[in-house]
Image (spheres, rainbow, N blue to C red):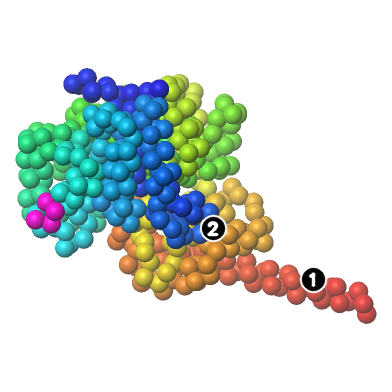
């Protein structure tokens, strides 16, 4: 059985949590976009999802996190159906969902109430265990104020907690430090029951690499711990980047535990902090679930030497120059059809400073990563509509343009090489 966090009132919460953002699809990808041969074009595989949810429950995973915005709006209803059919009682698991009122049309309090009512309906429950203000710092403090303060939504959530319709009230944080600090400064008034932050061994001290205004996870965790606010972790694998093989990371970790995956190292890092209530994993494949359950059954905390090795790995990873894309898909859909996450993810895999792929290998890999030519970097118009939706505040058009320049240059080199080869072949016959 997986390791558990004990709350002050004695409730045991699984240290491994299920993040319902990347549910499995019929074509083998996940419902936020990815598929083995490109962008997923099929729906959620409900039968597989139900087997996965039951497997997690059978192995002690009790925390399930969703949102009205996940999986193109299907996450709550699909998760609710899977939990209801699992054979487990409602009291056996914890449901976390969010007030995901990102669109200005959803700011009015009546719209927020409709969203909450839909969440109850879709999740087939009459209460929510953990309710979150979703991504409070995204798009600045002014937007946070309009979404939750000026419309009375936060005060309404407090009333829901008093009525028992939500058991615990918290928030997830990205972006503007002012929003985070405002919430903590008002902790005495709102009495936050938990907070969800992005934390992993890279963001622990390198979050400002993504955006200078970001707050390092070390600071976020310390501030929350000082106030005795339990911490829920999102992006423990940095959008999967810390699970994929990376030379800069492997050279620091492989000598210590040759058989351990990079994902296991990342989970052991976040699970080693005593105020972490649960670490969310957007598990799509059954094999990922099995490995993660094994990692947490029970979780082996890091020792001092292992913490030091991960700090070196984080330094080397940042030095390799990655784009901080977590494949969250918030930038999608692109109005011009680009598969933005696939382009950026492949850019990291192929063009990291530690990699030594040939030009032809990079081009072949790019064609596989983004198989539809109409979705590749050269189709970008630089409109910038994606930027405001990115929790990491990546300068997406600039990164796409840089990727396009690399690809076009490699095509030119490959073309010149092919012409040279043909000329040399022709000379043999003279």
Q: Quadrant of the N terminus?
A: top left
Mark number displayed over residue 155: none
How much space separates mark 2 and mark 1, taking CA atoms? 32 Å
Which mark's residue is nearer the viewer, 2 or 1?
2
Task: Give the overall secondary structure of the magenta segment.
Answer: helix
* Count of labels in the image: 2
The reply to whether the magenta stretch includes residue 166 is: no
Q: Is residue 53 above or below residue 301?
A: below
Mark number displayed over residue 421: 1
Task: Identify the residue at image location x=42%, y=49%.
Answer: 45
Q: In this rendered view, identify the residue nearer to me: 220 or 385.
A: 385
* Residue 215 makes an appearance in the image: no
Task: Identify the residue at image location x=88%, y=76%.
Answer: 427
- Secondary structure, mark 1, is helix
For residue 107, what is the image quadrant?
Answer: bottom left
The extreme right residue here reads: 430
Q: State left or right for residue 250 relative to residue 55.
A: right
């Amino acid at each position: 059985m997986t390791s558990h966090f004990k709350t002050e009132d004695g409730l045991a919460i699984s240290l491994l949590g299920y993040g319902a953002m990347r549910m499995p699809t019929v074509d083998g990808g996940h419902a936020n976009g990815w598929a083995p041969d490109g962008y997923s074009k099929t729906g959620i595989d409900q039968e597989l999802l139900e087997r996965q949810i039951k497997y997690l429950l059978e192995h002690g995973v009790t925390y399930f996190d969703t949102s009205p915005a996940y999986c193109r709006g299907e996450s709550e209803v699909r998760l609710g159906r899977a939990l209801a059919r699992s054979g487990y009682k409602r009291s056996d698991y914890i449901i976390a969902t969010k007030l995901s009122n990102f669109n200005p049309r959803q700011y009015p309090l009546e719209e927020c109430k409709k969203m909450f009512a839909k969440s109850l309906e879709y999740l087939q429950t009459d209460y929510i265990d953990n309710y979150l203000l979703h991504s409070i710092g995204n798009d600045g403090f002014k937007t946070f104020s309009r979404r939750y303060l000026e419309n009375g939504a936060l005060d309404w959530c407090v009333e829901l907690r008093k009525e028992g319709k939500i058991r615990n009230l918290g928030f997830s944080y990205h972006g503007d430090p002012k929003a985070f600090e405002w919430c903590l400064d008002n902790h005495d008034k709102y009495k936050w029951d938990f907070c969800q932050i992005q934390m992993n061994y890279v963001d622990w001290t390198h979050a400002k690499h993504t955006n200078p205004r970001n707050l390092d996870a070390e600071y976020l965790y310390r501030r929350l711990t000082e106030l005795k606010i339990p911490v829920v972790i999102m992006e423990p694998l940095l959008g999967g980047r810390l699970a994929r093989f990376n030379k800069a990371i492997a050279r620091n970790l492989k000598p210590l535990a040759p058989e351990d995956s990079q994902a296991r190292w990342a989970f052991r890092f976040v699970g080693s902090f005593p105020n972490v209530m649960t670490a969310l994993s957007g598990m799509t494949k059954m094999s990922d679930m099995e490995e993660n359950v094994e990692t947490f059954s029970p979780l082996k905390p890091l020792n001092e030497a292992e913490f030091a090795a991960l700090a070196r790995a984080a330094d080397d990873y940042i030095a390799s120059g990655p784009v901080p894309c977590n494949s969250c898909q918030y930038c999608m859909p692109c109005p011009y059809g680009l598969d933005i996450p696939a382009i950026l993810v492949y850019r990291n895999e192929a063009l990291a400073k530690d990699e030594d792929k040939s030009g032809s290998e990079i081009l072949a890999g790019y064609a596989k990563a983004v198989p539809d030519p109409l979705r590749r970097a050269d189709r970008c118009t630089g409109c910038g509509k994606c930027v405001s939706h990115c929790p990491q505040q990546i300068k997406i058009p600039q990164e796409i343009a840089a990727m396009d320049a690399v690809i076009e240059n490699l095509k030119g080199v490959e073309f010149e090489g092919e012409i040279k080869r043909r000329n040399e072949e022709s000379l043999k016959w003279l």
